[in-house]
Image: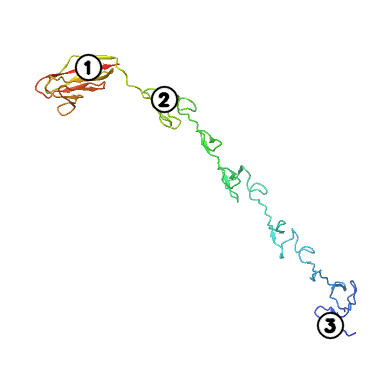
Amino acid sequence: MAQFQGKRTDSGIPIHVQRERYTEGESSASLEGSVCLGEKPGNVTFPLQIDADGYLKVTSTGGGSSGHEYQDGDSNFGAYGHLILGDDGSNLQTISVDTDGRLQVEVVEGGYDGVQYEDGAAVASPFGTVALGHDGSNVYPVYVDSSGRLQAVALGYDGAAERPLSVDTSGRLQVEVVEGQYTGTQYTSGDSDPSPIGTVALGHDGSDVFPIKVGSNGYLQVDIHDSPKATVLNTSSDVSLLAGVTTMIVGADADRLCIIIANPAINTQTFRIGNASTDASTGIELAPGESIEIETTAAIYGYNPGSGAESVSVMWTEE
């Protein structure tokens, strides 16, 4: 059979192309054949191996140990390779990932393994990737609900300590009214209070406080009282009004309900009736034969613009 023989001279290893004529482990002193062979030290030949896809099988021997570029803890002198490596300052360390290929990181800045800060940890200058609160000495996480909304507790100050504000089941703020006579009540009907205050409508009778009443529709309820009935009728002698002078007809009387003053028909002058300032141009005119009814307890005066004195008639009532 014809043969083609070729010889490599770069490494000194002859290669012959022919029918297969060697088996694994034979001496490589006179190499020839139709398969690719490799030679190990000691003049021993071995066929080169490929996988099921025809890829050449190669065992990497460079690095710290056979089959690996580097091992964890290898010296980093002259380091190179295809894996991501980290340097701990003295040795090389491989970078770890999980089964999904995500980088594994251990948080060591803080007081505890895997945790940046614990509740109540003493930290002078806090920082981190979650929202943290700092009370001036310690670190606390900021709380949110399942929707990510910030959770906050409203606090009040009683003058000595902070206390949470209370709400009912509808979220309405609960308030206790303590300004007044009784706990939870501003005033009780009939309380004695010279200077009443409050957030409900209150009435004051001059000495006591009473709530103003409304109906179920919010309308003000008002009691209508009849005017007091007179039980006493008083009369007096006619009162003379001197010419050109303002004269007091009756003095003040706290018991008086109503007073009637009449200008007798026999008079010739039209008088002016009013207070102490009544004169020729002020007060109510009262012509002869007319009368005037006034509900007052104050003093009443009359002015006579004539040249001679004339009188008025007076009658008043009391309870």
Q: Residues within 10 Å of mark 1 (few under 14, many from 20)?
A: some
Q: How many marks?
A: 3
Q: What's the residue type where badge 1 is placed?
A: Met
Residues at discs 2 and 1 in contact (Cβ within 8 Å):
no
Q: Considering the image in quadrants, where does the N terminus appear?
A: bottom right
Q: What's the residue type where badge 2 is placed?
A: Phe
Q: Position of residue 33 (x, y in %)?
A: 87, 78
Report the disc number at residue 97: none
Query: Can see residue 156?
Result: yes
Q: Position of residue 154 (x, y in %)?
A: 53, 39
Q: Which residue is mark 2?
A: 210
Report helix, strand or loop for mark 3: strand
Report the disc number at residue 315: 1
- Nearer the observer: mark 1 or 3; the answer is 1
Please tell me which residue lies in front, 59 or 274.
274
The picture quadrant where one finds residue 79 is: bottom right
Q: Position of residue 20 (x, y in %)?
A: 89, 77
Q: What's the residue type where badge 3 is placed?
A: Gly
In this picture, residue 258 sits left or right of residue 240: right
- Nearer the observer: mark 3 or 2; the answer is 2
Q: How much space separates mark 3 and mark 2, taking CA atoms?
A: 127 Å
Above or below 11: residue 131 = above
Q: Which residue is mark 3?
A: 6
Which residue is at 41% across, 24% downward? 209
- Nearer the observer: mark 2 or 1; the answer is 1
Please tell me which residue lies in front, 37 or 169.
169
Query: Can see residue 195?
Result: no
Report helix, strand or loop for mark 1: strand
The picture quadrant where one finds residue 192 is: top left
User: Which badge, 2 or 1, is on the more N-terminal residue?
Assistant: 2
